[in-house]
Amino acid sequence: MKLHRCLVLVAAASLSASALAGSFTVTPVRIDIPPLRRAASIEVQNTGDQPAQLQAERYRWTRDNDGDDELAPTEDFVVTPPIMQLAPGQKQIVRVLLLAPPDPKRELAYRLILQETLVGNPPPNTVATVLRISLPVFVAAPKAQPELAFSLAREGEHWRLTADNRGSAHGFVVASRTAAGDKLPVSGYLLPGERRSWLVASAPERIVLTQRDGTEVTVPVDPAP
């Protein structure tokens, strides 16, 4: 899979301002370091028509009770090269090397952010908004697996559907629906120990989750105490 992100240059206050554009591809779109391994790599390509420079930023990744990302700077892994300047069309292999010992029982989650820094000065009458590409980094643990559980509680005229990942690895839900076929807003990553909730109009008894590999898993919904 490839991640394609465009660099957008916003016109300045003048109505005659022009805009430039650049873009990148990143392959793959997530970094998995399996058990007994200490490194992984991605390929970054500048598919735009201007030179570009990217700088790597490293964070430990958790989430708060609202499902918002919390990023803390980390030295648990290094990235080489940490800064890269790419000519138009140029490719760069970027390696991620784990320094901290992996947790033998629980998956570790990080974020690698590639932050663009401008090369030279933009042309007159243009204002650049720089690019940030955020990639998840997962350090696997032997036998670690997600374990998603759902519960339901009445909240006014609606229902609050809560998802808990009681497992030791992340889960990733592409899409979800009730057993009757009604779509649900449950999707995205659920990190180990994470809890998220959504308001839904109806009370599902079972949820069908579509996973990253295309398989479907049916999960019962328990009434909340």
Image (cartoon, helix red, strand yellow):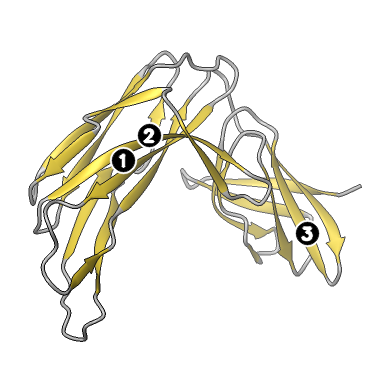
Q: Position of residue 171 (x, y in %)?
A: 57, 39
To which quarter of the image does residue 201 belong?
A: bottom right
Residue that badge 1 annotates: 28
Residue that badge 3 annotates: 160
To which quarter of the image does residue 63 belong?
A: top right
Of residues 9 and 167, the one nearer the viewer is: 9
Task: Give the Cα distance between marks 3 and 1.
Answer: 35 Å
Of residues 29 and 216, the one nearer the viewer is: 29
Please tell me which residue is depicted at 18% across the width and 65% down the height of the picture: 21
Q: Is residue 203 visible?
A: no
Callout 2, which amino acid?
A: Ile
**SS at mark 1 in the image:** loop
Is 102 rendered above or below residue 172? above
Cβ atoms under marks 1 and 2 closer than 8 Å: yes
Residue that badge 2 annotates: 31
The answer to which of marks 3 and 1 sits earlier in the sequence is 1
Of residues 17 and 173, the one nearer the viewer is: 17
Q: Where is residue 56 in the image (x, y as percent from the top left)?
A: 30, 37
Callout 3, which amino acid?
A: Arg
